[in-house]
């Protein structure tokens, strides 16, 4: 089945990709189309903006995490049943691993999924020079996938002339322009953009943006371009289930057992960074995911067999989290009884004995990790990593690998030493993660499809915990 799609890339970060992507998504929704959206690379916040616009979960696609086959599978799985898909690129179009490779770049995603790409070109301070920039991107790789451009921050007075020159001199179609827009400014903080709910009048602004783009962007042309994309090619992976005991994994349908185990998932303003495909994979393997708020709820959900603490902004809510002593005690006791737990970045910080907030005050936290999380004022570890287990533990046997990324301005007096993190294409490495038979907690964000046995072991441990705590067999 053909799945119409196009990718929006740019020459560099700050070119207006997210703003233009949201405007185009809203314009397509306004036309009555069922739209799916995707973000290239390890990004949590941009998909939240997409989700706000299209009304359903946006996803990530990342060739470093999943290679060619799984990337095409995940795209097709999540685009199924929609009329059109829009992918938003990351950084500069060719910027990938380690800053020295095109692997895992927006270009690489377009190449792997055979998706036509449209380059957003910020023309501020340029006129004819924009042709040289576009020509360079077209010719840097013979299979650039770039078939169109959108000119951002260009004056309507010169747009038609620049468009004519581009289409006369370069093998590319101009799909319109975006004038200077000051009413839709996305503010940033230390981990990236602010959250969608923090943008005052977001819905109104996006709808206003879409109305502008209806006038200045050739949406019909983009839809025609999307329809030229070929059918995705992939082999469907076999996903083992929580109660499978066969050495050979079974198929999705055969292994999916609803509510085989219950996993409590922290979800509120402090903990909101999750890959949706990670959560879907847990559910597909047989876990029921029950959300709770470490800020507002007094204790873990009843009958929880395991605990998942994602990243986010706990440092912004350090006082509120610390004052919710009943929740802290509930988590401390559950982990002490052997409840399996996976925690990443902000979730890892929450498990510390103390955590420094953005106000500079050190607050008592859950005390599962006898260490203090503190602010460093600078980005410490950033980007993709490959993690290798250095000892047998819940997440894997010694020598087993899983991929992920780090991005944080905080550090810990004890980051753990159960895994060795290595930067791809670089020589830098470091120890990280506290790993035991029931715990995997540390700064790295893991991508489960890079090693599906990591989440499988977690929910199997959850199942064993539930049985040992007299919950019986769930149905």
Image (cartoon, grey):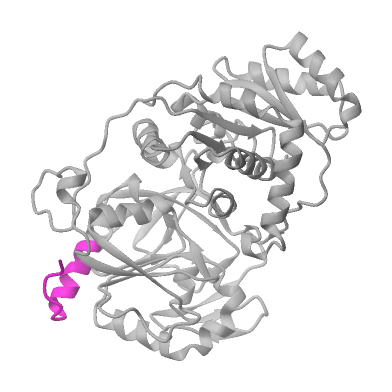
Horizontal arrangement in the rendering, residue 385 relative to residue 381 (left or right): left
Which part of the image, by quadrant, shows the C terminus? bottom left
Depth check: 388 or 319 in front? 319
Task: Give how far across and how far down residue 331 sits, in percent.
Answer: 36, 82
Depth check: 327 or 411 in front? 327
Instruction: Indicate whether 81 appears above or below 321.
Output: above
Residue 362 quadrant: bottom right
Instruction: Indicate whether 185 appears above or below 369.
Output: above
Residue 147 visible somewhere in the drawing: yes
Task: Give how far across and how far down residue 258 sits, in percent.
Answer: 21, 60
Would you say residue 473 sits in the magenta stretch? yes
Q: Residue furthest top?
A: 168
Instruction: Indicate whether 317 appears above or below 442.
Output: below
Q: Residue at x 34, y 62 (%)?
A: 418
Task: Give how far across and how far down residue 135 sits, in percent.
Answer: 72, 17
Would you say residue 337 sits in the magenta stretch? no
Horizontal arrangement in the rendering, residue 34 relative to residue 146 (left or right): left
Residue 392 visible somewhere in the drawing: no
Horizontal arrangement in the rendering, residue 326 relative to residue 90 (left or right): left
Which part of the image, by quadrant, shows the N terminus? top left
């Amino acid at each position: 089945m053909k799945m119409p799609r196009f990718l929006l890339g740019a020459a560099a970060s700050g070119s207006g990709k997210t703003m233009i992507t949201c405007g185009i998504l809203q314009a397509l929704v306004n036309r009555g189309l069922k739209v799916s959206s995707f973000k290239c690379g390890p990004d949590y916040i941009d998909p939240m903006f997409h989700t706000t616009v299209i009304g359903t979960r946006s996803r990530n696609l990342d060739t470093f995490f999943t290679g060619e086959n799984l990337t095409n599978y995940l795209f097709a799985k999540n685009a199924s049943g929609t009329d059109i898909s829009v992918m938003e690129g990351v950084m500069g179009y060719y910027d990938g691993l380690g800053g020295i490779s095109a692997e895992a770049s927006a270009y690489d995603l377009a190449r792997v999924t055979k998706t036509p790409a449209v380059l957003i070109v910020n023309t501020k301070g340029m006129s004819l020079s924009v042709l040289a920039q576009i020509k360079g991107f077209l010719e840097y790789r013979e299979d650039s996938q770039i078939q169109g451009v959108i000119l951002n921050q260009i004056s309507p007075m010169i747009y038609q002339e620049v468009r004519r020159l581009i289409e006369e001199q370069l093998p590319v179609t101009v799909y319109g322009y975006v004038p200077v827009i000051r009413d839709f400014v996305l503010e940033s903080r230390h981990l990236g953009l602010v959250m969608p709910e923090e943008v005052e009048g977001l819905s109104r602004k996006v709808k206003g943006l879409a109305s502008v783009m209806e006038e200045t962007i050739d949406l019909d042309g983009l839809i025609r371009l999307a329809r030229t994309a070929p059918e995705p090619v992939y082999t469907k992976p076999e996903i083992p289930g929580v109660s499978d005991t066969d050495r050979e994994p079974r198929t999705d349908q055969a292994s999916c057992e609803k509510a085989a185990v219950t996993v409590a998932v922290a979800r509120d303003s402090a903990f909101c960074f999750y890959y949706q495909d990670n959560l879907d994979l847990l559910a597909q393997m047989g876990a029921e995911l029950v959300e709770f708020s470490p800020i507002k709820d007094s204790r873990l959900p009843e009958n929880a067999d395991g605990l998942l603490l994602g990243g986010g902004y706990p440092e912004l809510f350090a006082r509120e989290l610390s004052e919710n002593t009943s929740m802290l005690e509930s988590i401390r006791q559950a982990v002490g009884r052997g409840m399996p737990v996976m925690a990443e970045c902000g979730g890892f910080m929450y498990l510390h004995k103390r955590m420094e907030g953005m106000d500079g005050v050190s607050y008592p936290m859950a005390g599962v990790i006898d260490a203090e999380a503190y602010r460093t004022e600078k980005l410490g570890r950033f980007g993709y990593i490959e993690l290798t287990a250095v000892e047998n533990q819940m997440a894997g046997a010694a020598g087993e690998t899983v991929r992920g990324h780090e991005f944080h301005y905080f550090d810990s007096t004890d980051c753990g030493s159960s895994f060795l993190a290595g930067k791809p294409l670089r020589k830098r490495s470091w120890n990280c993660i506290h790993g035991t038979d029931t715990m995997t907690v540390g700064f790295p964000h893991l991508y489960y499809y890079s090693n599906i046995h990591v989440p499988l072991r977690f929910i199997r441990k959850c199942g064993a915990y539930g049985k040992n705590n007299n919950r019986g067999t769930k149905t």
